[in-house]
Amino acid sequence: MKPFHVGVAAEAFAAGLFARAGFDVSVQYGANQPEYDLLVSRDDRFLKVSVKGSQSGGWGLVQSHKKGRGYAEAIEHWAEQQSQGVVYCLVQFQGVELDQCPRVYLATVSEVAEALKRSRANAGSTRLREQWAYKRGIAAGAEEAIPNAWKFSEARVSQMLQSAA
């Protein structure tokens, strides 16, 4: 897929998954809207969701904040720029056949920022990886993975809706 197709597929898949879990879903009209892609609700509680798709095993989130900053500072700057209450929905297509569902994770901005800071054996990174083993460099021998607690589920969405209220 081309990057455009990854984004469209991720957003559409995420919207369908939230709806299948019993949440109302509103899609923000137009490509590349600021702040969020989806508005998810239940029982008069709302959650802004920014959907990020990938077919490479990771999501580059902080690169544009790195110039002139160390990793920790870039991550903090990125986190400060995020809208209050936005949740990230990370959709991974790597290794997923066309007739299979992608892997999907939900995380708050602070959870993503902490994971980015722990990346590369606590040296920090601009890229969140689903699962990775470092073979060389400062983090040689280190491994990292998206926490199991981030896996998409109705309970995870409900937990985030409760926190957003």
Image (tube, helix red, strand yellow):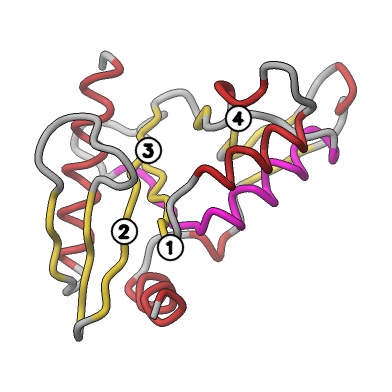
The amino acid pointed to by label 1 is Gly
Picture quadrant where residue 78 is located = top right
The amino acid pointed to by label 4 is Arg
The magenta segment is 102-122
The amino acid pointed to by label 3 is Lys
Gap in angstroms between the C-alphas marked 2 and 4: 22 Å
Q: Name the residue under label 2.
A: 48
Gap in angstroms between the C-alphas marked 3 and 2: 13 Å
Few, some or many C-alpha atoms within 10 Å of disc 4 (few <14, some 14-19, many ≥20)? Answer: some
Q: Earlier in the sequence, mark 4 or mark 3?
A: 3
Picture quadrant where residue 41 is located = bottom left
Q: Mark 1 points at which residue?
A: 85
Residue 103: x percent and y percent?
38, 46
Q: Earlier in the sequence, mark 1 or mark 2?
A: 2
Q: Kindly report which numbered mark, 3 or 2, lies closer to the viewer in this rendering.
A: 2
Q: Mark 4 points at which residue?
A: 127
| Secondary element at image label 1 | loop
